[in-house]
Image (cartoon, rainbow, N blue to C red):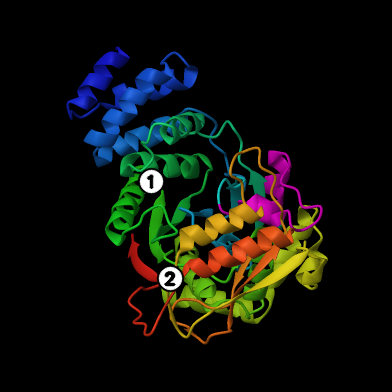
């Protein structure tokens, strides 16, 4: 078998066999296929596409390229959740304690963020002393004891995906449904979950800009899950504006705490209830989504979910007292109000640009070497559909520098679209694919 022949075959729009896909992934991971041939191959895939069977075979080949986490020692059905990413996406910090407090094991493997804000690990490090470094035995023991643990993603998990993604990132081949779906699902399958709930974002602040593109991706990923025996559900949710109010690591942690106390943003809570209900049903703790939703609402009302967050943070070395006293979380030196200069209604918030403004403040990483400032970010005060009057505060900038804060304030104002009237035609949940 020659790589040249595989490139030619896919360039001509022909279907690749499982053996041919395995050959490519195995030898590219080993380094015997050079980047220039791999680049030509993924460009051919980008233009000619892959069918559902090819995409599933590509996913499985990437799973087999490295370690597969064995979670068999964890009692119960393990359900994982993955988001395709967005702005102010705090769902894991709310969702995991809710689900775990129902006795459902949440064994999370997460990474550090590259983009608007930090990843889940970065956010959790807002709790002083919190650590994701633990041996596999301790990780499994924590999940069995408290039903929740989080560790850093190992480099040996789907290493083929890591190599391919780096190549796609510099060859303009990222936005292909088969390549995105296989990338996401290879990591989720290798992470060992029995079932998977996907939060597929759509809109200005998401990778998929249209509901049609998001639905295509959701169907592809659910199809892959089914083909490898993993129950998979995809929820397509709005990211045409930031989720919740907070964008920034410690700010998002505080918002998650408030949501578990029952005082958080309605859109964040609603999305967590939808995602969580599907997780509870897949874990066979409830027969219907309605029953599952009622169970999740009860653990917030009773304080069980909040207590689970405290238990989890303490078990991984973090200062759980911050949950009762959020003043102990990292705080920015300057808090600068963003004042609106006209009357009207918020028609749109340019979510992607707002995320980039937060990154420029230091809330995210422009490169892998960037150092995150956990204290900085943006807290929105007005969202889509809200009425505003001249002089109202529409957001607050949390900054380590007065100069950076003032620039961010001006940029935020320029990325709010305020008009004389507003008609709401954007749902929080577009669709659910099972």
Identify the image quadrant of residue 44. Answer: top left
Q: Residue at x 31, y 25 (%)?
A: 41
Task: Report the front residue among 334 and 317.
Answer: 334
Q: Nearer the viewer, residue 174 or 264?
A: 174
Q: Is residue 373 above or below residue 299?
A: above
Magenta residues, start to end: 116-144
The answer to whether 22 appears left or right of 110 in the picture is left
Q: Nearer the viewer, residue 250 or 305?
A: 250
Reading the image, the residue beneath label 1 is 229
- Of helix, strand and loop, which one carries label 2? loop
Secondary structure at badge 1 equals loop
- In magenta stretch: residue 197: no
Residue 425 point in image, percent of width and height = 32, 76
Q: For residue 103, say whether it is visible.
A: no
Number of marks drawn: 2
- Residue 106: x and y, percent? 59, 56
Measuring from the top left, give residue 387's x and y in whole percent: 47, 86
Res 98 visible: yes
Q: Earlier in the sequence, mark 2 or mark 1?
A: 1
Q: Quadrant of residue 11?
A: top left
- Quadrant of the image containing the N terminus: top left
Residue underneath mark 2: 287
On whether residue 120 falls in the magenta region, the answer is yes
Please determine whether, in this image, residue 31 is positioned above or below residue 109.
above
Residues 289 and 413: in front is 413
In this view, 51 is above or below 167? below
């Amino acid at each position: 078998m020659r790589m040249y022949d595989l490139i030619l075959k896919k360039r001509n729009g022909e279907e690749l066999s499982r053996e041919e896909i395995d050959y490519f992934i195995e030898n590219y991971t080993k380094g015997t296929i050079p980047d220039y041939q791999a680049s030509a191959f993924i460009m051919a895939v980008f233009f000619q596409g892959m069918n559902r069977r090819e995409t599933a075979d590509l996913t499985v080949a990437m799973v087999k390229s490295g370690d597969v986490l064995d979670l068999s020692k964890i009692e119960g059905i393990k359900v994982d959740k993955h988001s395709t990413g967005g702005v102010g996406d705090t769902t894991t910090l709310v969702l995991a304690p809710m689900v775990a407090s129902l006795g459902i094991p949440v064994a999370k493997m997460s990474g550090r963020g590259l983009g608007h804000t930090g990843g889940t690990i970065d956010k959790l490090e807002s709790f002083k002393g919190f650590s994701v470094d633990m041996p596999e035995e301790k990780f499994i023991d924590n999940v069995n004891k408290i039903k929740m643990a989080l560790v850093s993603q190992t480099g040996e998990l789907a290493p083929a995906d890591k190599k391919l993604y780096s190549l796609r990132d510099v060859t303009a081949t990222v936005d292909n449904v088969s390549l995105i779906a296989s990338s996401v699902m290879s990591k989720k399958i290798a992470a060992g979950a029995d079932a998977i709930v996907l939060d597929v974002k759509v809109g200005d602040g998401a990778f998929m800009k249209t509901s049609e593109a998001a639905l295509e991706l959701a169907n592809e990923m659910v199809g892959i899950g089914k083909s490898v025996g993993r129950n998979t559900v995809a929820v397509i949710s709005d990211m045409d504006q930031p989720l919740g109010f907070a964008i920034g690591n410690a700010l998002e942690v505080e918002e998650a705490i408030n949501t578990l106390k029952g005082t958080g943003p309605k859109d964040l809570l609603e999305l967590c209830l939808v995602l969580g209900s599907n997780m509870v049903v897949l874990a066979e703790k409830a027969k219907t989504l309605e029953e599952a939703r009622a169970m999740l609402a009860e653990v917030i009302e009773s304080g069980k979910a909040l207590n689970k967050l405290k238990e989890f943070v303490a078990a991984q070395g973090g200062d759980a007292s911050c949950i009762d006293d959020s003043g102990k979380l990292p705080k920015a030196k300057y808090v600068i109000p963003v004042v609106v200069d006209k009357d009207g209604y918020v028609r749109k918030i340019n979510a992607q640009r707002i995320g980039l403004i937060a990154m420029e403040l230091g809330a995210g990483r422009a490169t892998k070497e960037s150092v995150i400032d956990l204290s900085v970010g943006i807290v929105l005060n007005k969202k889509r559909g809200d009425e505003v009057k001249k002089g109202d505060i529409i957001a607050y900038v949390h900054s380590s520098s007065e100069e950076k804060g003032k620039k961010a304030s001006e940029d935020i104002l320029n990325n709010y679209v305020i008009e004389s009237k507003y008609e709401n035609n954007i749902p929080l949940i577009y669709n659910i694919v099972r």
